[in-house]
Amino acid sequence: MLQALRASPRVKVFEKTEKMLAPENATLDTVIANLAEFADVSAHESFRSCWMSFERLSVHWESVDQAAEERETVGGEASLVYLFDLASRGTDLVTEQASEKERELLRSLRVVDDQPAGGNGTFAAVRLVDRKLMPDVWFFDIRTGIHALDVNYCDYLDALITTKGGYGWQYLYADIDLTKPEQRMVRERLTNLLAFLASAFPDVDYSALQERFDARTARRARGRH
């Protein structure tokens, strides 16, 4: 992903960080042992399928060829959290209006991917349940709330690579009705993102993502007939 972004003449990379773990911590067994010893936390076995030996991995980018009719430049951002740090990356989202079920969910979230540079008020998280990190992924947007994604942590990383971390890509995997008027900004952002990705990275097949978008906007299209 980082190589593709850096190599594209249509992308400006503002920031990227690739900080590898120290050799003594660069195995998943060591990280899991440290989680157990220092944080009293275990991890679901599926995390082994997508282990990344980075202490920090992040990127922030924008397209350099904004069309005149576009209201905002296409861009993206990812800031992945080191597995050991997940235990301490909680959220502060519980409000007095939240139900007890909602409070339980919000308290369990542990941030795995953040977008601090863009200031979008979004992040992705897994859950810490009974002191165990679980692989199901949730997406929070300050404008639309919390959404369950139909991907696990490993699938999330795969989708992140494909989408290059383009802003709002997570909505392609969320159970959300994009036909609603209040989701117009999300629709427009995804429309512009998918068009840019397909054009800027023609060696990648984006048809599956386009199908996801079409499925979430199908009712809007039918309503016009």
Image: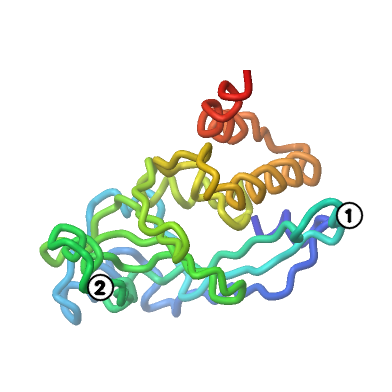
Which numbered circle lies on residue 101?
none
Answer above or below: position of 36 versus 160: below
- Percent across and percent down for residue 176 are 43, 42
Query: Is the C-beta separation of discs 2 and 1 under 8 Å?
Result: no
- Percent across and percent down for residue 156 are 45, 49
Q: Which residue is mark 1?
A: 68
| Quadrant of the snapshot with the C terminus | top right
Amino acid type of the residue tagged 2 in the rendering: Thr
Q: Residue at x 14, y 67 (%)?
A: 131
Query: Which secondary structure, mark 2?
Result: loop
Picture quarter containing residue 221? Answer: top right
Q: Residue at x 74, y 68 (%)?
A: 13
Q: Which residue is mark 2?
A: 95
The colour style of the image is rainbow
Answer above or below: position of 4 versus 179: below
- Percent across and percent down for residue 97 are 22, 68
Amino acid type of the residue tagged 1 in the rendering: Ala
| Quadrant of the snapshot with the N terminus | bottom right
Q: In the visual, does 126 lie left or right of 202?
A: left
Classed neighbour count for the residue bearing mark 2: other residues with Cα under 10 Å, few (<14), some (14–19), many (≥20)? few
Q: In the visual, does 166 lie left or right of 114?
A: right
Q: Nearer the viewer, residue 29 or 140?
A: 140
Q: In the visual, does 222 lie left or right of 134?
A: right
Mark 2 or mark 1, earlier in chain: 1
Q: Nearer the viewer, residue 49 or 57?
A: 57
Q: Residue furthest top?
A: 225
Q: Residue at x 43, y 70 (%)?
A: 81
- Percent across and percent down for residue 126 are 31, 59
Q: Residue at x 72, y 47 (%)?
A: 192
